Amino acid sequence: MITCEEFFAEFADYLEDQVSPEVRQELELHLSQCRACQVLCDTSRKTVKIVTESGSFELPHSVSDPIFDRVMAKLRTDHS
Amino acid sequence: MSFLREARLEDRFEPFVAFQDALGFIPNLLQAQTLLPRVIEAQAMLERAVRLREGAIPRAQKERILLSIAADRQDTYCMALDSRVLSSLGSSDGQIDDLLNDYRNADLSAADVASLQFCLKLSRHAPSLCWEDIEALRTCGFGDESIFEVVVVTALAVYRCVLSMGLGPEPDFGARKLRPTRIDQPRSLAPHGLLPDGHKGAQRKGPYVSAPYLSAKTFAPFAVIQKSHGFIPNFFRAQTLRPDLLEAQLEAVDRILLPKDALTRVQKECILLAVSAANLNSYCVAAHCNMLRGLGMPSEDGDQIAVDHHESNLPDPDKALLDFAVKLGTRGSDISREDVVKLKTLGFTEKQILECVVVTAFNNFVNTLQMGLGIEPDFAPPPVFEENKVHLSSGAVTPMQVDSAVRLVDKLQDADAQLVAQAQGGSLEAFEELVRRHTQLIYRTLMAILGNPTDSQDAMQDTLLNAFKHIRGFQGRAKFSTWLVSIARNTALVHLRGRRNVESLDQGDYEEDGDFRPRQVRAWQDDPEQCHSKSEIRQLVERGLLQLPAKYRVVVILRDIQQLSADEVSRQLGLSVPAVKTRLLRGRLMMRELLSPHFTASTKGAVQ
């Protein structure tokens, strides 16, 4: 079976679902027997999900509209 | 004499000794490369691993493949050489004659005929190879190892033919003549025609043969690749059935692609990119675009070389070098001494021309392996280069016949294209609609770099003004959104210059924090989001992101929050895909550490 270090070397691609069937098999065999990597994997997936669904740094219309208005007003004056 | 000067090497030069032992003489094809002994070593290593080593298919079968491909490409040099070798292995003159003219008449087993049919298709029409061709081999009793070997021998045949066409060595033996009634290979090749309707085989993807897992820890070549590329591309992973061959290829890469004593690394990558594009190999196009980005070339410039190098920013001599390489890689039999003389008058040295020939040959070796093994891409090809549009729909058009098939590629399909055109024509309304579409992308890019809302909102205003100012300069080589992000990035960097303690976005990854390791090992709740309100979670995530170093924050925000693909992120930030992957993993793991206290199984409660 592969070591934790070898598991970690493939981990980025595994999280992105970009490993070949052969590699996946090795990784999942390791996961089935290694609690630490299992936790790492599970918590990392949950992290990605939480970050993705958080909607962070979304600029509300109440802020963006005045910016657009100022910019467009300036462009119209410059243009005419 | 071949097209280039030759040098005298000492008699004990190892590859010469090896060829003397294996064949009883030193082929002129090797003599023609004596200006760069390292490339002779590369060829000797490949030949040893592919041709001479005992493998899954018999030596004579390999030689028949080499000869048939040489004949198919009308390569008189290789035809004479390979005929002599086959004859020394016991083939009759009649059989050799049949192989040269029509292998279907030769007295061969069904398996042999199937392998020749397969190899000729791979050599001539690699992009049309499909799952059915592999199945045809399997029904003749070929297993993974022998299919692999048939593909590699084909790749070697292609390598040798490109070398001999580009170098023009004198035949070692009397020329073999082809009969005028020789079969017209392209029309009668595949049992199911060149491209069946709907091209079903293409829907079933590779890889065609199994590839056992090898670890970078125990398999030294993978450790080398890991270090040089930052990851192990599928191209190498797909070849683990034959570790010895992988080793030989890396030795060849070391001797052909890495040295800088003749052509530069960038020149060689440009050759690999342009010839792969002409061969319609989207895997290699994506890989070399990425390599060029890693060598500092802006991604639009690399993309342009893939589409049409004549329109690129390269200096004229380099364009001529690529013309030569593309002609050699796709229509090698048209190369003559005049082509070589032309490069010399443009100032290229004989060593550089030799290296260009060898790089082109090696490129076609790699292209053939990739197509023959159905290796899956690591990265998306450039948005403007979609090979399917060219070769799948155009029926009889094959890479061998089309001057520069990629020129047929449509201009980029961008949902913003129409509005961009109107905005470039001066329409303010079109411009406003266009940038409003990308509000969140711009703002998040700015937040990612600047790390605070007030600055980001100021920079947003400047970004929009800059975008309008420069929109006429946008040429549609990249997606409009990619261009817009680059404007936002530059605007943000100008804002940053006004600050002290600027964090760099461009530090390397591998050295300074190479052993970042996750520390938190406590499990999280099954449903971590349940214990916090949506706004609490958003606050936690935003606070966490602002604690990350900027170079990780940018990648996490664009990939996970803005949900761009790794490839798009790499284009927008001008980073290689592997660098994006490394930073993304680090950033995600840092976020995991920061979020962990709030979500571990034993913790309940609100934001602290």
Image: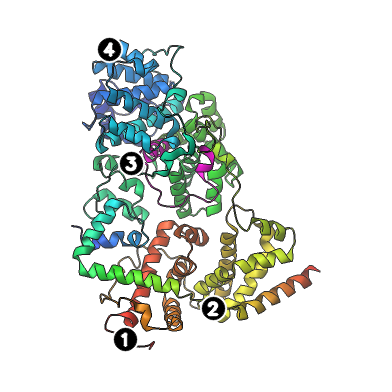
Viewer-side residue, B326 vs B142:
B142
Label placed on residue B92: 4
Horizontal side of B188 relative to A19 (left or right) equals right
Callout 3 amino acid? Tyr
Q: CA distance from mark 2 to mark 3?
A: 55 Å
Q: Earlier in the sequence, mark 1 or mark 2?
A: 2
| Magenta-colored stretch includes residue B383 | yes
Callout 4 amino acid? Ser
Label placed on residue B531: none
Q: Earlier in the sequence, mark 2 or mark 3?
A: 3
Identify the magenta region: B363-391
| Percent x, y of residue B241 | 25, 42
Which of the 4 image quadrants contains residue A41? bottom left
Q: Which residue does the numbered mark 1 point to in the structure image?
A: B604
Q: Which residue does the numbered mark 2 point to in the structure image?
A: B499
Marks 1/4 in contact by CB < 8 Å: the verdict is no
Callout 1 amino acid? Lys
Discs 1 and 4 share one subunit = yes
Q: Secondary structure at mark 3?
A: loop
Discs 4 and 2 share one subunit = yes
**Few, some or many C-alpha atoms within 10 Å of disc 4 (few <14, some 14-19, many ≥20)?**
few
| Percent x, y of residue B161 | 40, 27
| Percent x, y of residue B168 | 44, 23
Q: CA distance from mark 1 to mark 2?
A: 40 Å
Callout 2 amino acid? Arg
Identify whether B35 is placed above or below B474.
above
